[in-house]
Each structure stands twice: as C-alpha cells, then as structure tokens.
Amino acid sequence: MALEKKYDFREVEAGRYDKWKKAGYFTAGDKSKQKFSMVIPPPNVTGKLHIGHSIDNTIQDITCRYKKAKGFDVLFLPGVDHAGIATQAKVDAKLASEGTSRFIIGREEFMKRAYAWKEEYTAKIHEQWAKMGIMVDYTRERFTLDAGCSKAVNEVFVTLYNKGLIYRGQKIVNWDPVMKTALSNIEVIYKEDDGKFYYFKYPFVEDPTKFLTIATTRPETMFGDSCIVVNPKDERYKDVVGKKVINPANHEEIPVIADEYVDIEFGTGAMKCTPAHDPNDWIIGQKYNLPHPIIMNVDGTMKENCGKYAGMDRFKCREELLKDIDAEGNLIKIENIKHQVGHSERSDAVVEPILSMQWFVKMKPLAKLVLEQQASEGKIKFFPERFEKVLEQWMEKCDDWCVSRQLWWGHRIPVYYHKTTKEILVSAQKPTDMENWEQDEDVLDTWFSSALWPFETLGWPDNTDDFKRYYPLDCMVTGYDIIFFWVARMVFQGLYFTKKVPFKNVIIHGIVRDSQGRKMSKSLGNGIDPIDVINNYGVDSLRYFLATTASPGLDMRYSEEKVKAANNYLNKIWNSARYILMNIPEDYKAQKVDLNKLETIDKFILTKLERTIKNVTKAMDSYEYGVASTNLYNFVYDDFCSFYLEMSKVTLKDENAYKEGTYFALLKTLQAIIMMIYPFSPFIAEEIYLSLPEHKESIMLESYPVYEIEYEFDEADRKGDILKNIIEHVREYKVKNSLAPNAQLELFIKTNLDLKDIYPYISRFSFAKSLTATDKEIEGASSIILDNVTIFVKDGIDKGELKARLEKELTQVQSEIKRSEGLLNNPNFVSKAPKAKIDLEKQKYENYKDKLSQILLKLKNI
RNA sequence: GGAUGUUUAGCUCAGUUGGGAGAGCAUCGCCUUUACACGGCGGAGGUCAGAGGUUCGAGCCCUCUAACAUCCACCA
C-alpha cells in the first residue's frame, strides 16, 4: 500500500483512537503474560486538562505502549478525582453567578449540582485523553467518590481510628476564611508580602506611665492576648516578670511571664502571647494553662469578644484598632517589613491560624514505616534518584495531618454522635437507628482518598482478582510538585494497609514552562493549551516533543520550534517509508535470506540497526526516553536516511545484486524504526505499519524489536564507515576547490584493503568519471589521505579554467567592495540613511571582505 | 536558616561506566537530485560559570567560590 506524498497528521490521526479502543487493545487481562500495571494520577474534575497533564500522560503512555510491545499484559487504569475544595469552589462560584448559594439550596441539591459538574468535566477529560492517544483501560475506570472508593475510605478511617492513628482534637490549624474550612499545612502557600510591624505600648497596671514595647504584625489578634512573655535570662526584663500590663486593644490586664522560647535578640525581646491564634503561642498557652479566647469567626470577621469591632472584617478591624490605639497614645511606631504570609492554595485568601476542633492523622508511626521501607532492600526507586531524599526529608519532619474539611463535596467523615448520650460511634456502616444519631458534618481532605488510589482502584479492601494480579503497581509517573501531596501519602497508606509498597518505581518529571521560562498561570495568561498544539502540529509531534525535550526531573520550556522539528522528523520517517514501499515489489513476501550473500551495504545497516536496538532498549528500560529518542534519531538521520537509503539506490539498480537481501534489510530496518518510534508517536507509526507487507491488524499487536547478534557484521560495519569517510572527503574536496557537487572526477584508490564491493557506491556518490585501483602514486593528481586509504583525484578541470573563473569572481567582489566603501565613506549616506540600512551595508562589506580573502586563498593554492 | 538543582555554540537544551564536544532553531555557501525543500550537501560558531585538586587523560569525580532557580522551615 503506497503512502501519500506528504505526512498529514490530520489524516493519520483521524479515527484511529476509536478503532484501537473498540478493538479492545486497551483492555488488560491476558493472564498468559507477565503483568505491568500503572494508574493514571486522577485529574481534578475542575476544568480542562493543561500541558502538565499532557507531559504526565505522554510519559505514562510511552511506558505502557513500550511494555505492551515487549510482551506484557499492561494495565493502565484511568480515573478522575473529585477534588473537594477545588470543585466546591467552582460549583459555589457557579451558584453565586445564578444568584443563589449552597446554603440556600441545601446539601442534597448541592450534591446534585456538583455531580452534574463532575459528569460534564469527566466527559471533557475523556475527550482530551482520546486526543492524547493514551491507552487507558476504560473498562476499569474509577472515580474517587464512587462506591468502591468510598468503602475503602471508610475502612481506612475506621481502622486508623481504632488503632489510635486518627484522633479528634483542638489544635491550631490553617484556616481559609474564604472557603471557610481548615487546611493541611501543605495546602498553605507562603509568599513574600509587604507587611508592617506595629509597635505598641502595654502600660504597667501599677504605674501606667511605664510600659513594655510589644511588636506585632497582626494587631487584630491582640483581643486574644493572654500574657506577655519574656526570656528569663533577659536582664532588661528581670524585674517585670510577674507584674501585670494593660492590653491597649481591650484594656484588660494580662500578666508578664518568663519562658525560654522567647528570642532575646528578636524585636524588643518581649512577645505578646495569643494562644488561640498562633501555633507557638498555643504551645506556651498549654504549658502555663493560659486562657485561649478565640476572637475570630469562620469568615474572618471579629467575634463578639472584640467589643465594638465585633462583626468587622479582620483587616478592617486592624485599621480601625490602629487608629483607636494611636488616639490613646499607645502606638509607638510602624515599620515596613517584608515577610512570608501564608495563602490558601485554592482561594489565595490569607490563611488565619486558629484554634479549632478537627480530625488528624498521627504521622509519626506512619512516617516511620516509610523511612524503614526506604532504608531497606525493597525500597521504592525514584527516577531520578535524588527525589528519594525529598520524600525522606519530608517524612522526617512532617506534622500531624489535618484531614477534616468544612466542605460538602467529599467523603463524609464516618463518625456519628448520639443525640442524647453524646456517645461517639466511628463506623464504616451507618448505625441502624440513624434517627438517634448525627453524622459528623465534615468531609475528608481530597488527598485522603487519593492516597488510596493505587489499591482502592483495584478493588481493595476486597481481595479481588485485579488486586491480586495487578498490585503493587510497577510504576508511578508524576511531577515533583506533587511528591508531598500525593506520592508520600500513597506510600504510607499503601505500606500500612497492604503491607506492600504501592508501586516499585516512581518517575518524576518537571513542569512545562512558557518559552520565557515562566511558570504557566491563569493570571499571566501564558498557558499553552495542548489542544491548540495538537490542532496545529498533531499529537504525535506534541508527544515526541514532551517526552524528549526535558531531562528527567527537570523543568522544560515550551518551544514551538521544537514541536515543528518533531514534526519534520516524523515527516522524514514517513518519507523514508514511502521510498521503501515504492521500491520493493508490489507482491513482496518475506522469505529466508542467505545472510552470507547480503551486500556489504545491507550488512552495514543491519549492524547499525542491531546496535541501535540494543541502546534504545536499554534506555527505554530505565525510563530514559530522551536518551532513547536521541539514539534512534541519530540512527534514522545519519545511518539510515542520509547514508543507507542513498546507497540502496545503487544496489536496487544493479542487475547482479542480491536484491532479496536488500528488500529484507530495508523492511527489517524500517519496521524496527517504526516500532521504536511507536511508543512516542503511535499514530504515524500505526499508519506506516499498516502499509507494510504482511502486517498484523494493528501495530498494537506487534512486538518490539529485539537485539539479534546474527545481524551484526563487523567487517561490513568497518567498510561502511570507510565508504562514508571517502564520500565525505571527496565532497569536501569539491567545495574547497570550487567544484560543483556533481563535478565529474577521475578517482584512483590506493589501499591494502579489499574494497571492490563498495566501488560502485564510491563512484556514484562522488560522481566519478572513472574509478581505478592503483598501487602507486598518481602523477598530477591531488591526494586525499585517510586511514588505510588514499584517494587520488584528477578533477579534469583545467587549472587555467579554474583560475580564470576565480579571477572573474575576484573582480566582481572587488567591485562590490569598492561600491560598498564608497557608500560607507559618503558622509551624506552615513548621516542620513536609516540605521538599519547602514548596518546592513556594513554587514555586506564584511561579507565581501571575507569572500575576497577566500578567493585569494584558493588562487594561491592553484 | 536547611536542602536540592542549574550554569556547555547567538537562543533553547542533550551529553549515565572519565578518552570524538553534540542536537534543534538561527546563520553563511552550494544544490530542484524521482522518498522527503517539512529536503540534500558543506561551512562558520564553544578556554563546557570561575579557581584549585585527583588522573596518563576531566564537561563528567573531589574541594571551594559566584550567579540564578526551586523546595522545606521560619521569630512574635
């Protein structure tokens, strides 16, 4: 079957994905094979996928397609994430735009709306997966809120609770006043903001003319002050410990106490202590059993215990309070500072540390599991390796994980409170007398369920066939930005609940930045939509670009030029296939070839091919897709297209050549190239594959080429390299001597090697008029000396003729230089012409000078 | 404050057992040659951040320095 002249990605890609999908090629389950399993990191159902998902999915799909071609039963399990806080924010915003809110429509109606949202975006995600061409097994698709996942979540929660690894407690948490929920520590993004440091007088009760100077960045929290703390070793404050001062915000008397925690060097050395609104103050408060009034509401407004500021927004309160304290003469100064301020990852609101009753996962014992595993033989291997350290360091110092969220969209916490006895029931099943109970209002952190993804998707907690066969996963692909959020938590939950690592290998990739190296963001509007790229250049080019541009674990810049370059490369492969199919017989059938009878040139390409297969396979096996593609690329361009295909033109015209062997070599090489490019760019690979003689129904059923030593021929390899070398030097000779590329030469070869079999190729590619073996120097000829071979060249061109031509060129260039000099020395031109024009002329002048010296050199050499 | 990464051609980046300095794009010259002008052939362009060290030999290993980036932790 002949290929079209041009590689048109639109035609190549159209309809292909559906065919694969319908044929069932994506479905795992061939028990006769060894398994290879992987899950997709479930994308959030909040919006369309971005290029970060594309790189993730490309690497995953390359891995899966490669493993399938290597003969594995590959499971690539898809699914989506309910993304609690993110999705709820979107649905809330949509409700708001309709003039309503979840509080108006109620929990049940809200859930309906959220599910509708989920359906809409899941459909979009499916479209994008199809566009990307990923071979996910749709028969096993999951959703983090589906019945199975919910069962797993309840099981995990109840078990951890019963083992004392989940507890409910009052602690300082990060509060998002916009989403009105607690957050975990890693959902807080610290940014450097311009802030102010306010210095206040806290007058002594016994003598209000004297005071302590206290600095704070958050004056509104002064309503929650319960004491002043100084360091017991601080000489300045020796006498004030035990005395009382007046809080200038609410005029209440609070004691001065001493504690080592206070840094003598920092600020004034005296610190106000607000136990309910600062994690460190909380620890001091607990130590001294201090009162800990909460002074803020869930929406960031001040509580009734803040006097006239009650109901005021926290920042408004700060402003007003400042004025009032100043009016009373208790404001000393305001200093501008830059400091790190925590923002909510989702809403960007300034996070408020606040005392709150929440559910926590106790991290120490779980972290220990991970650290022990990573110190053992069976540790999870990261690619690149250095990310293992990132995981370990985080596990060593992570705090307890706040898992309750004051949201509606998510897994409801499986805890029930008895209406009358106040008894607490933690249970995977609802109590039978539900009317007497109230379920905890909160839902769990999204990552609580994501952490179970590698096993809950396979049927756990039931011991299903899939779980038995496909768990643990062979590999996990994700970005480094998500190691803490996700990878770490999958590891400890997996270890705790399945007693096995959830996956053996973790492949870490960087993020895709814009062409200037900036992070892509909505506010900058610099995002690259993968769908646009696919529409312009095809998904095969996008995938090739994403998989081969970056080194593992490093960020990459999006580059349209490189996507184009990928497209050109694929076009090159396409055309090489086209050439081969045009040159083999219409009714070609593979048959046994006599390896001994193969032409040298055919042996040569087979040899290079085998080495390429070896190198590419090695790189693919260690997930080094950039290395693999470079190996293949060099082979395709240098050995295959530039050299071998050109040489084959000679063989195919030669009556006496062993053409069966050439057909064999051409097809074997082509098929191997197609198979090696296939994981990267499966659509074009399939199209070409289906044009080959005796192909299977789809390239998805074909196997990966394997290295076979019988196709390595050392002597042919050497001869091929000599041939290449000779041709290159003859070409260079022509350029240096101002000869046309197709100038006819008389060549003589002097060598101890037997090179007769490659003479025809030398002749053809150096446009030799004649080619003669010789064992002595040739008079009057130039010589090209190579290792083991000397070529004598009679270029047939009269020296006088060459000289005349060069002299003519010389005259032309000299006159150009004269013209240029005249122009550049003309004061009118220099002062009046546009700068660009002048620069251009200067440039031309330089070029002419260069050319002049080259011509002079050549004339000298005659 | 702690940790990690980066620094190679004009630009963006490869370079994994230490022995050839490379690719894409850009640039210059020649070429419409029946696979491909989304092309072919050839050229120019690099004290591989800097300084030391190990080695017969260092872009690659060790030490220090500088710049940039990222992550973690943060003191009111």
Image: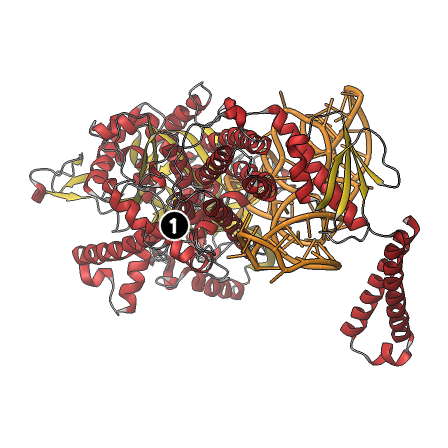
Quarter location, residue A376: top left
Which of A380/A37 is in front? A37
Which of A100/A696 is in front? A696
Percent of width and height locating residue A211: 56, 51
Residue drawn at 90 percent across, 49 percent down:
A862
On screen, A367 above or below A329?
above
Q: Secondary structure at mark 1?
A: helix
On screen, A853 above or below B47?
below
Tag 1: amino acid: Met
Q: How many marks?
A: 1
Taking the image as shown, residue A249 lies to the left or right of residue A138, namely right
Taking the image as shown, residue A169 lies to the left or right of residue A539, namely left
Is residue A206 in view from this perspective?
no
On screen, A164 above or below A352?
above
Which of A288/A770 is in front? A770
- What chain does mark 1 sit on? A
Which of A578/A850 is in front? A578
Give the class, few, some or many, for how many residues have Cα within 10 Å of label 1's Cα (few <14, many ≥20). Answer: many
Quarter location, residue A194: bottom right
Percent of width and height locating residue A793: 80, 41
Percent of width and height locating residue A411: 24, 44
Indicate how the structure is coloured in the image: secondary structure
Is residue A328 in view from this perspective?
yes
Residue drawn at 40 percent across, 39 percent down:
A588
Which residue position is annotated with label 1?
Answer: A132
Residue drawn at 43 percent across, 41 percent down:
A678
Percent of width and height locating residue A223: 42, 54
Taking the image as shown, residue A152 lies to the left or right of residue A46, namely left
Residue drawn at 45 percent across, 41 percent down:
A674
